[in-house]
Amino acid sequence: MGETILEVSHLSVCRGGQPVVEDVSFALSAETDTALVGPNGAGKSTLVQALLGLIPRQGGSVRLLGQELGPRGQLPVAVRDQIAYLPQLFAPTGPLPLTVAEFVALGGVPWRQRRQAVARALALCGCQGLERRLLSELSAGQLKRVLLAFCVVRPRRVLVLDEAQAGLDAQAAEQFHNLLFDLRRSQGWTILQVSHDLDMVRRSCDRVLCLNRRLRCQGAPAQALTPPQLERLYGKGFVPYAHHHHSVQP
C-alpha cells in the first residue's frame, strides 16, 4: 500500500431531508484508479460532490492529501489546486466566445508559462489544431479530451470524474479511456471515477467501490464484480450492458 491520498470515514449525506449516502468509509492509495459503481439513484454523484466539499455532509469525515475537509468544504488552496474534477455534464450551449486555448489556460498556470503549458497539455491530449476552435464547436469526443487538457495543464495529484464517458459513442469512449490510462501513468494521478461501464472497470481499474446508498462491497474488480455481488448491488435479473471495446493497453 502506498501513500493514502483520500480517506473517507463514516460519510453520510442527505438531500431534501432524506438520506442519500449512509455511513460510507473507504481510502484511496496514491496512483491508483478506483471506480465507483451502482444503480441509478444510488448516491454516486452525491458522494463525489460531498467528498469534494461541493455539498454539505451530515456526518463523517474526509481527508484529502492529508488535510481535513472542513464542515463547509474548506480545504487549503494548495491542496485544492492539486485536485481536478470533471462533472457529469459539461456542454457549452450557444456561441460561447471562449477558444480551446483560452479555456485550457484557465486551468491555472503563471502568465509567462501559459502559452508553453497550454501547447504541452493539448499535445498530451491529442488536441493539436484545436487551439483556436470555440468550445461550442467541438464534438463530444474533442470536448472530453480538451477537459483532460485543462486538468493536465498544471501538476495535479487527484482526478475525480463523474461518468466521464457520458455522451460518447463506443469508439470515442475507448479513445478517452486509453488517453486517461496513459495520463494516469505519466502524471502520477490518483483517480476516482463514477462509471456505468463495468467492462471498462474490469479491464482498467485497480479497485471498485459498489454503492447503493451504503457501500455494499469494495475490492479488486475480480472480487467486487462477480455475478452474486452484482445481483446484490443492482437487483435480481441484472444483465450488464456489453460494450464492444477494442483491446486495452496492459
Image: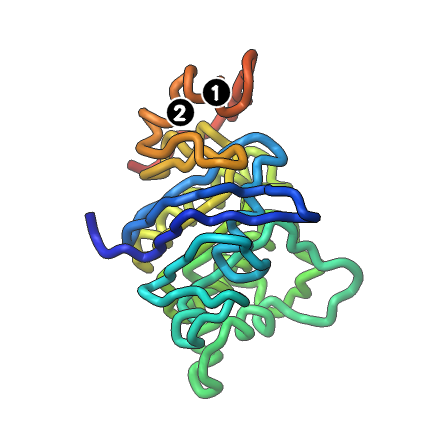
- Residue lying farthest to the top in this orientation: 237
Q: Residue at x 46, y 21 (%)?
A: 230
Secondary structure beneath label 1: helix
Horizontal side of residue 97 vs 239, given as left or right: right
Q: Residue at x 51, y 38 (%)?
A: 195
The amino acid beneath tag 1 is Arg
Horizontal side of residue 110 vs 31, given as left or right: right
Q: Residue at x 45, y 71 (%)?
A: 75
Estimate the x, y position of residue 191 in percent, counting from the top left. Answer: 39, 50
Say which quarter of the image contains residue 225.
Answer: top left
- Work out whether residue 110 or residue 139 is closer to the camera in this orientation and state it: 110
> Looking at the image, do the residues carrying marks 2 and 1 touch, with CB atoms under 8 Å apart?
no
Choose mark 2 or mark 1, whichever is in front: 1
Q: Which residue is mark 1?
A: 232
- Above or below residue 220? Residue 43 is below
Reading the chain from its start, which is encountered first: label 2 or label 1? 2
Q: Which residue is mark 2?
A: 225
Horizontal side of residue 17 vs 229, given as left or right: right
Estimate the x, y position of residue 23 in percent, counting from the top left. Answer: 46, 43
Near mark 2 (Cα within 10 A), the count class, few <14, some 14-19 or many ≥20, is many
- Whether residue 145 can be seen here: no
Which of the colour schemes (rainbow, by chain, secondary structure, one colour) is used? rainbow
The amino acid beneath tag 2 is Leu
Near mark 1 (Cα within 10 A), the count class, few <14, some 14-19 or many ≥20, is some
Estimate the x, y position of residue 194 in percent, counting from the top left. Answer: 50, 42
- Residue lying farthest to the left in this orientation: 1
- Above or below residue 159? Residue 120 is below
- Above or below residue 74? Residue 49 is above
